[in-house]
Image: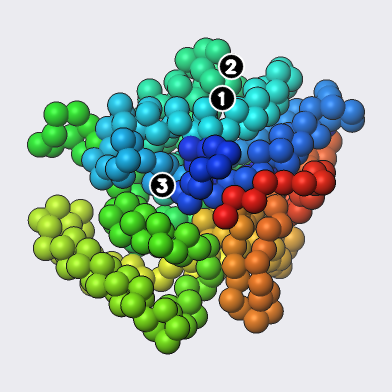
Amino acid sequence: MKLVLVLSDLHIGSGHRKGVVNPYDDFREDSRFEQLLAKYTVGKFAEAEIHLILNGDIFDLLKVSVNGKFPEAVTERLALVKVEQCLKGHPRVVKALSGLLANPKSRITFQPGNHDMEFFFPGVQRLFCRALTGEDSHPRVRFISEAPFFELEGGIQIHHGHQFEAIHAMDFKKLFITRGVSEPILNLPWGSLFILQVVNSLMVERPYLDKVMPFWPLFAGGLLFDTRFTLKMIAASSYYYVRARLNPLWWQKRPFHKITKFLRTEFRLFEHLDQFAERILKNPGVNAVFMGHTHGEMVRTYPRNKIYVNTGTWMPMINLRLPNLGQSTALHYGLVRYASSGEPRVSLMRWRGRHTQTEEVIF
């Protein structure tokens, strides 16, 4: 039996201490994450070949502070401090991943997203691998660093999805800035810098700020019912935007002939990834596409048995669209079952797990 599990957008942070509110860690499903991976290590799956794909934003390192600050110049040393906090803050996650790898037929592939770019650093990859296996490298732990997507057999492409939004897209030809600095730093996209400079400071007052979709109804309602804070948000965002555009580095990142296209697309946030997937699926060699990033689970089927799956998120989200109005705490993952002939069957699964009778209230 050969199975592929696809998870994205867990947004694991530095952990929760009893009696201390941490608005920067949105992951509270350690128990059910552990249960999910345990399901695929026992019973009929005990001898199965399991490939777990961690498809971006598994860790929310943009919201992990170092000495109380959110540094913009992220070196490998800072990245190690941030990831170490997350691993220590969620030991059950580490235990679950280690337990999966205990099966010699299982393996893990980690594809960084726009919230965990730190995993492009070799030292961070060694730290993560060491936490899971006790070794700096392992033949069954792989990191995708050379391209924004990769492929599985059977014509399946795995994208995180951020590359289709100009504000979040990474430059894979220049993942690190080395010129004019003492040690390499991450070449963060402007969306990441916006989170570090603006969103994180605003979340102290409104912890739900990045958990509402779509954002425009919250913004419009805020002008009426939360005017002071909304105006503060507009002022902070405008200041950041102007300052960024006056920075010579921005013009180096965006050559003149690309500026018009960038300005036209940079505000299209969390929209229409299914349209990009449909375009990809027109390729005769592609039969399925997985994405995450938008925090909205989705399945779309197309002619010739082609399929697009978005695995959603494991962080609680408030949906203001009328068909799905309310808070969603559903947990999703992608599943690929390979038949003996090698033909894949692709599904989006909803994980329920076992709920405890009581749980601590964080907020």
In primary-sequence order, the first of circles 3 and 1 is 3
Q: Is residue 182 left or right of residue 258?
A: left
Task: Name the N-terminal-most of marks 2 and 3.
Answer: 3
106 in relation to 266, above or below: above
- Kindly identify which residue carries mark 3: 63
Marks 3 and 1, how far apart at CA? 25 Å
Q: Nearer the viewer, residue 362 or 330?
A: 362
Q: Is residue 30 left or right of residue 347?
A: left
Instruction: Estimate the x, y position of residue 354 in percent, counting from the top left.
Output: 82, 44
Secondary structure beneath label 2: helix
Question: Whole-percent x and y of residue 98?
Answer: 65, 23
Q: Nearer the viewer, residue 59 or 104?
A: 59
Query: Which residue does the image show at 54% across and 37% down from the upper left?
Result: 17
How far apart marks 1 and 2 lie (CA) works out to 9 Å
Q: In what element is the residue under mark 1?
A: strand
Q: Is residue 233 visible?
A: yes
Q: Farthest residue toward the front?
A: 19
Say few, some or many: other residues with alpha carbon within 10 Å of mark 3 (under 14 / 14 to 19 / 20 or more): many
Q: Residues within 10 Å of mark 2 (few under 14, many from 20)?
A: some
Q: Is residue 26 left or right of residue 68?
A: right
Query: At label 2, which amino acid type do we have?
Result: Thr
Q: Earlier in the sequence, mark 1 or mark 2?
A: 2
Q: Which residue is drawn at the image coordinates 32% and 52% (left, top)?
A: 196
Q: Which numbered circle lies on residue 133?
A: 2
Quadrant of the rendering where the N terminus is positioned = top right
Q: Are the residues flagged by discs 3 and 1 in contact, CB closer than 8 Å?
A: no
Q: Amino acid at mark 3?
A: Lys
Element class at badge 3? helix
Task: Give the image's coloring scheme.
Answer: rainbow
> Residue drawn at (67%, 46%), measured in percent from left and top?
360
